[in-house]
Amino acid sequence: MPENTESNIDQDKNYEMNEEQAPLGADKLDNDETIATNSVPLDNAGKEISNDAPAEGATLNEASGDKDPVEEARIEIAELKDKYIRLYADFENFRRRTAKEKLEMISGASADMLKAILPIVDDFERAKVSFESTTEIDALKEGVDLIYTKLFKTLEAKGLKPMESKGETFDAELHESIAQFPAPSEDLKGKVIDEIEKGYFLNDKVIRYAKVIVGA
């Protein structure tokens, strides 16, 4: 009988110990779930971090004072566009001014040439009157020669120079061949044997090609 009583007492103690440990385990689970549910992220100072807080990179940019690269690119593009517009406007003004000066230069040169030729026109008008009143052919010829010489010297003073083509080798840069005839001699083959219309230079630039006949 005593042995059975002692075993019953031991079983009762084990049961009481199990009942005491079970609530402790349950409480621990409940506490863990509560901590997992109610846990809030904290910063290094222990303050709660809001979900609306800016990202770490944005916070660093704001703290360091850096600008948004997209905004910087927009500002740079606007500045370049403004510079382009100003440069284009300056170029247009320069082009118009240059064109105007060129027209004025051409007009001035034409006026200067006409002023130089007007005295020769006066000489031709006087010669024309003389044709009607005089019968001396030699005097008329002499007057015409003087007027021609005066005109030619005036043009030479303006840079005009006649082109010497007869007997020269044909040059497509200077001559315009209008026909080919058999050359009178072997040494004239490929050369200008006759000149139909004289060519002219103006300040070493061809202003009229010589019309020539080339020996074949």
Image: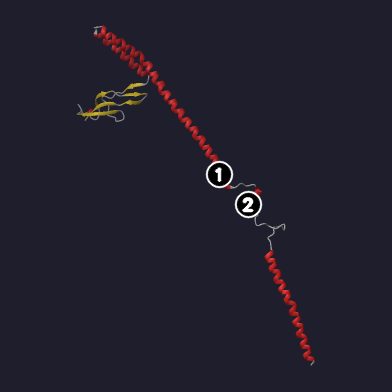
Q: Quadrant of the C terminus?
A: top left
Name the one closer to the observer, 211 or 105: 105
Q: Horizontally, is 47 left or right of 105 in the view?
A: right
Residue at 65%, 48% (x, y): give it: 64
How many residues crowd mark 1 within 10 Å: few (<14), some (14–19), many (20+)?
few
Question: What amino acid type should be assigned to the residue bearing mark 2?
Answer: Ala
Image coordinates for residue 60, horizontal then vertical, percent: 64, 51
Above-or-below relation of 210 to 48: above
Q: Quadrant of residue 99?
A: top left
Q: Pointer 2: what residue?
A: 58
Q: What amino acid is found at the position of numbered circle 1 in the picture? A: Arg
Q: Which mark is residue 74?
A: 1
Picture quarter with the N terminus: bottom right
Query: Looking at the picture, how far across and down is residue 14, in whole percent?
Result: 75, 82
Q: Is residue 70 above or below residue 84?
A: below
The local crowd at label 2, few if under 14, some if 14 to 19, many if 20 or more residues have their Cα within 10 Å, is few
Q: Mark 2 falls on what kind of element?
A: helix
